[in-house]
Image (spheres, rainbow, N blue to C red):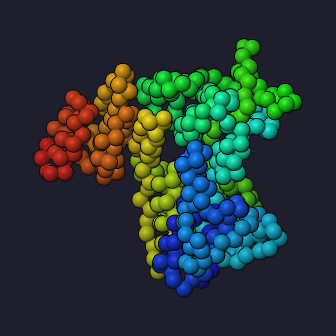
Amino acid sequence: MQHVIIGAGPAGVIAAETLRKLAPRSDIALISDEPEPPYSRMAIPYYLVDHIAEVGTYLRKRDHWYADQRIELVNDRVASIDAHGHSLGLSSGHSRGYDRLLIATGSSAIKPPIEGVNLPGVHNCWTLEDARHIIERAQPDSSVILMGAGFIGCIILEALASRGVKLTVIEMEDRMVPRMMNDRSGGLIKKWCEAKGVEVLTSTRVNGISEDGHGRLGVNLGMGDTRPADLVIAATGVKPNTSFLSGSGIEVDGGVVVDHRLRTSAPDVYAAGDVARGKDFSTRSFTVQAIQPTAVEHGRVAATNMVNGLEIVHQGCLNMNVLDTMGLVSSSFGDWEGVDGGDCAELFDGDRYRYINLQFEDDVLVGANTLGMTQHIGILRGLIQTRVRLGASGKRALMANPLNITEAYLKATQGTTSSM
């Protein structure tokens, strides 16, 4: 059996490992268009501050690990897929056949459509190659402008500040991490960063970037405000890598469309990770979740279903994020924005940078936001993911004080809840 995986991120590597365990006699090929061994993008901030070398970002650090596992690493780009003929066209001009194929091509960072965004000195922070350029320019006392204060931007924010640069963060929305935190918590993260010496401009748009001919950049914010910069980093979002699927017959709708077993519309072709529209645990709808825990889970499920005689249904991944922004830990789980007709419990302590927001559907906890609190993160995730009924007393305890999480958990799991 010829198993081919396109993409060497967490989804692809976990899938390859799973296939090797479940199908020890099969041939497995892992195709990547980056020259480095498979690595974790989430480790790049640690590389930026010299906490690890490049090898520290590698997903599997032992020399010859892939060869020892009989996983063939192929450095090439897939240009096309012939789903009917079960073959791939590669940019090198070669072709490759498959019996089962996994599309795990992940996503790519995007740059906003503004003038000057492709000038030298304007970079994403998504690949190791990006990181090398950033290290070269982000020297102590240099001026750095970070466009975007979403999840990706906030991951690299601390690494940039730790390099001793003069950092300005520019975010179009009215708060930081707007797709993860609400107004109150996102506002507290901004206040925290400013107290650490980082300038944060929310509700602000970059209109264009210019260059003075000597490598110095100018970032135009409008109204006569142009900020000088030695480096501009665009952390303004990502998009699934699906362009090579044009003409393949594989259905794409914002991401590769998959079913409950992560099968695509083409026979013997599966998809996993950032590129796939997988099932969301909370909403039960199919959507792209560009987060590493989802990629890992997708890789395991898809690989299992690629093996003859094995088949499991994907129950859906919980949309969850945990973020450390200059020492302030924030988290979001599930339907953190709430559901129609649901109740909400909130506790806010701005002076101590502490916040918690719980969202309910009847007596079930369906979503949560926390800031500056880490002791209850595991219980919150468990309550949301198991959809355990809290009962009247458990919910009442949380509505009175959202920090009564352990009490509510014990009431729910030890059978002491009363019905609503």
x, y percent for residue 270: 58, 66
Q: Quadrant of residue 134?
A: top right
Identify the residue at the far front of this view: 140
Looking at the picture, tell me which residue is in the foreground, 143 or 67.
143
Instruction: Answer left or right for 305 relative to 34.
Output: left
x, y percent for residue 332: 42, 40
Q: Is residue 246 visible?
A: yes
Question: Looking at the image, which residue is at 71% across and 34% down?
Answer: 231
Q: Quadrant of residue 223?
A: top right
x, y percent for residue 182: 45, 30
Q: Quadrant of the N terminus?
A: bottom right
x, y percent for residue 141: 66, 29
Q: Quadrant of the C terminus?
A: top left
Question: Looking at the image, which residue is at 49% across and 60% down?
Answer: 296
Q: Is residue 56 above or below residue 154?
A: below
Identify the residue at the far bottom of this view: 25
Looking at the picture, tell me which residue is in the foreground, 141 or 261.
141
Q: Quadrant of residue 275?
A: bottom right
Question: Looking at the image, which residue is at 65% across and 33% down?
Answer: 140
Instruction: Answer left or right for 200 relative to 95.
Output: left
Q: Is residue 207 above or below residue 313?
A: above
Q: Is residue 109 visible?
A: no
